[in-house]
C-alpha cells in the first residue's frame, strides 16, 4: 500500500512538472514536498493511527510522533476525553513541525473499525486494554495494515495463536511492544549468553512486579464521554465501575487481563529470557507454580507467584514476582556452568566477573538484531518490509509462557507442554483453559 501511495504521488509531481514545461510556466514545488530540504517527503511517510490512547497509549503516541518517516494521521479511543487529549497533542506537535507545509490536522475516531476502513492508513498501533488486542489486530491485518501491538499479545493462548497465524499468512509487518529487545544492555546480555561466555546455561531467574489488590466499588452509570459497551467489547457484560476502565484496575482483572502482571509485566523479562535461550519458536516442556490471590475485591489475578519451568537442554526457568528476590523490581539472571550475568531495565548489567562486561562479540560469533528504538524500528520495517526486532513468533512464544504459567498457578499441579503441537499432554482441564469465550457479536 505504501509503495502504491509513493508511486501515485511521485507520478502526480512529475505530471505537474511536465505541465509547467509544456506551457513554459514556472511550477513551484516546495522542497519539503520532495524531501530536498532534509525532511521526509509526504509520499515517503508511513501514515499511522493509534488505537487506544490511555496512559500506555499516550506513551506510544508520543513515541510515534518522534519517529523519522512516521506520520500520525488518526487517534482512536472509546473515551472522548482521551481521544481529544491525544488529538490535541498530535496537532500541537505537527503544527510546529509542519507549519510551512499546510498541516491539516489529526483525525479522532471513537470506533476502531472506522480507522481500519481508511485506505490512507498504512499501519496501526494497538494500545487498548489487553482484552481488545487480538480482535483489533486481526481486523487490521485483514485490511492490509501493518501492526504494532502492545504487550502482552493476548489474554488467551488461542487468541495469541490465531494472531500469529494470520500475521504470517498475510505477511504484514508486526512489532510487539515488549521494548526491551531494543535496549542495548539486554541485547548484549543475551549475546554473551548465546556465545557461551558463562558456559552452559543451566538456570534463568526471572522476576517482575507483583499484582495489586483492588477496592470494591458500587456500580454506577458510565459517564457521557465513554462508550462503555464498546470499551467492554468481547469481555463479559458487567455493570460499570470507574476503577475498572477509567483507572488502571483492568490491569488486574481477569476479564480484561487474564493473568494480571504475570503477563502484563512478566512478559518483559520472560521475553528476554527466551531471546537468550533461543526459544523464540519453542517453549517450556514442564510448568508448575503457585500463587497468592486477594481474598476479596475486584482484582482476581495473582498478587504473588512462584513458577518453575523446564525447557530443552534441561534449562530451568524460575519465574516469580519481585517480592521473592533481592535483585530489584524486575530483571533476568542467567546462571551458567562458568558464571552468571544479570540484566535489568532499571539496574543495568551486573556479573560476578566484571571483565565479562568488557567482552567483545567477535564478527564470527552470534550477533542479535540491533535496534535502538522499537517505534523507529517499526517504521523502518514498514518501509523496508524487513522483520522487526520483536516479531510475531517471538511475541507468541513469550506470551504463551506467561499464559501457561498462569494456568499452572490456577490449577496448582505440574503440567507437561508440547511446544510443537502446542497442547498440554497430561491435562485435559488445562487444555480447556487455552481459549476463552467472547461476548457476542465479537469474535476472532
Image (spheres, rainbow, N blue to C red):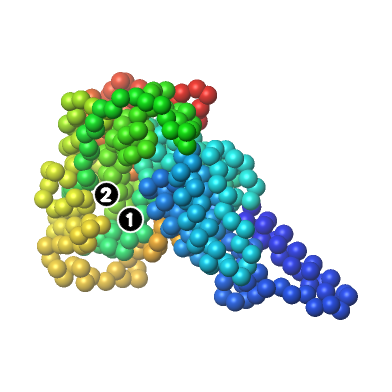
Q: Quadrant of residue 19?
A: bottom right
> Which label sits on residue 261?
none
Which residue shows up at 50% across the image and 65% down it? 68
Which residue shows up at 38% across the image and 48% down it? 56
Which residue shows up at 52% across the image and 24% down it? 441
Q: How far apart are marks 2 and 1 (CA)?
A: 8 Å
Q: Do the residues labelled 2 and 1 touch (CB within 8 Å)?
A: yes
Residue corresponding to mark 2: 269
Mark 2: few/some/many CA within 10 Å (<14, 14-19, 20+): many
Q: 316 or 82, which is in the foreground?
A: 82
Q: 226 or 58, which is in the foreground?
A: 226
Which residue shows up at 17% across the image and 25% down it? 295
Q: 92 or 175, which is in the foreground?
A: 92
Q: In this view, does 65 lie above or below 398?
A: below
Q: Is residue 395 above or below residue 373?
A: above
- Secondary element under disc 1, as helix, strand or loop, is helix
Mark 1: few/some/many CA within 10 Å (<14, 14-19, 20+): many
Q: Horizontal and vertical percent for residue 277?
A: 28, 51
Please give left or right for residue 39 compared with residue 405 in the image.
right
Residue 16 visible: yes
Q: Horizontal and vertical percent for residue 314?
A: 21, 43
Instruction: Give whichever of discs 2 and 1 has the lower sequence position.
Output: 1
Q: Is residue 411 above or below residue 121?
A: above
Please give left or right for residue 322 compared with residue 444 in the image.
left
Number of on-image labels: 2
> Which label sits on residue 180?
1
Q: Horizontal and vertical percent for residue 222?
A: 42, 30
Q: Quadrant of residue 132?
A: top left
Please give left or right for residue 200 compared with residue 123 in the image.
left
Please give left or right for residue 419 compared with residue 296 in the image.
right
- Secondary element under disc 2, as helix, strand or loop, is helix
Amino acid at each position: 500500500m505504501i509503495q502504491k501511495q509513493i508511486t501515485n504521488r511521485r507520478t502526480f509531481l512529475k505530471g505537474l512538472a511536465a505541465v509547467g514545461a509544456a506551457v513554459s510556466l514556472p511550477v513551484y514545488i516546495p522542497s519539503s514536498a520532495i524531501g530536498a530540504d532534509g525532511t521526509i517527503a509526504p509520499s515517503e511517510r508511513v501514515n499511522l493511527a493509534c488505537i487506544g490512547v490511555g496512559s500506555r497509549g499516550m506513551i506510544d503516541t508520543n513515541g510515534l510522533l518522534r519517529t523519522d518517516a512516521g506520520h500520525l494521521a488518526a487517534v482512536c479511543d472509546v473515551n472522548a476525553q482521551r481521544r481529544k487529549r491525544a488529538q490535541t497533542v498530535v496537532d500541537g506537535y505537527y503544527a510546529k513541525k509542519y507549519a510551512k507545509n499546510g498541516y491539516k490536522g489529526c483525525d479522532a475516531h471513537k470506533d476502531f473499525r472506522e480507522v481500519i476502513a481508511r485506505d490512507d492508513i498504512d499501519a496501526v498501533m494497538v494500545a487498548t486494554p489487553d482484552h481488545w488486542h487480538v480482535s483489533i489486530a486481526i481486523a487490521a491485518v485483514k485490511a492490509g495494515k501493518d501492526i504494532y501491538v502492545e504487550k502482552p499479545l493476548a489474554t488467551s493462548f488461542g487468541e495469541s495463536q490465531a494472531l500469529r497465524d494470520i500475521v504470517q499468512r498475510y505477511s504484514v509487518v508486526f512489532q510487539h511492544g515488549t521494548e526491551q529487545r531494543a535496549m542495548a544492555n539486554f541485547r548484549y546480555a543475551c549475546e554473551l549468553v548465546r556465545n557461551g561466555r558463562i558456559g552452559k546455561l543451566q538456570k534463568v531467574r526471572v522476576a517482575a512486579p507483583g499484582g495489586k489488590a483492588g477496592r470494591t466499588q458500587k456500580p454506577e452509570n458510565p459517564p457521557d464521554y465513554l462508550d462503555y459497551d464498546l470499551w467492554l467489547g468481547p469481555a463479559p457484560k458487567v455493570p460499570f465501575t470507574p476503577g475498572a476502565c477509567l483507572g488502571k484496575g483492568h490491569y488486574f482483572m481477569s476479564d480484561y487481563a487474564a493473568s494480571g502482571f504475570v503477563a502484563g509485566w512478566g512478559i518483559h523479562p520472560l521475553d528476554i529470557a527466551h531471546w537468550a535461550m533461543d526459544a523464540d519458536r519453542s517453549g517450556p516442556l514442564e510448568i508448575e507454580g503457585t500463587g497468592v490471590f486477594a481474598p476479596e475485591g475486584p482484582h482476581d489475578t495473582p498478587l504473588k507467584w512462584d513458577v518453575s519451568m523446564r525447557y530443552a537442554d534441561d534449562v530451568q526457568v524460575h519465574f516469580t514476582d519481585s517480592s521473592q528476590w533481592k535483585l530489584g523490581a524486575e530483571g533476568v539472571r542467567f546462571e551458567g556452568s562458568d558464571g552468571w550475568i544479570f540484566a535489568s531495565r532499571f539496574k543495568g548489567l551486573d556479573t560476578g566477573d566484571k571483565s565479562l562486561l568488557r567482552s567483545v562479540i567477535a564478527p564470527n560469533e552470534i550477533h542479535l538484531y540491533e535496534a535502538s528504538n522499537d517505534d523507529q524500528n517499526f517504521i523502518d520495517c514498514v518501509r523496508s518490509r524487513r522483520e522487526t526486532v520483536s516479531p510475531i513468533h517471538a511475541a507468541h512464544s513469550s506470551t504463551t509462557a506467561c499464559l501457561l504459567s498462569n494456568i499452572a498457578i490456577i490449577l496448582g499441579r505440574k503440567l507437561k507442554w508440547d511446544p510443537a503441537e502446542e497442547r498440554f499432554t497430561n491435562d485435559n482441564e488445562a487444555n480447556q483453559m487455552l481459549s476463552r469465550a467472547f461476548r457476542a457479536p465479537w469474535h476472532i
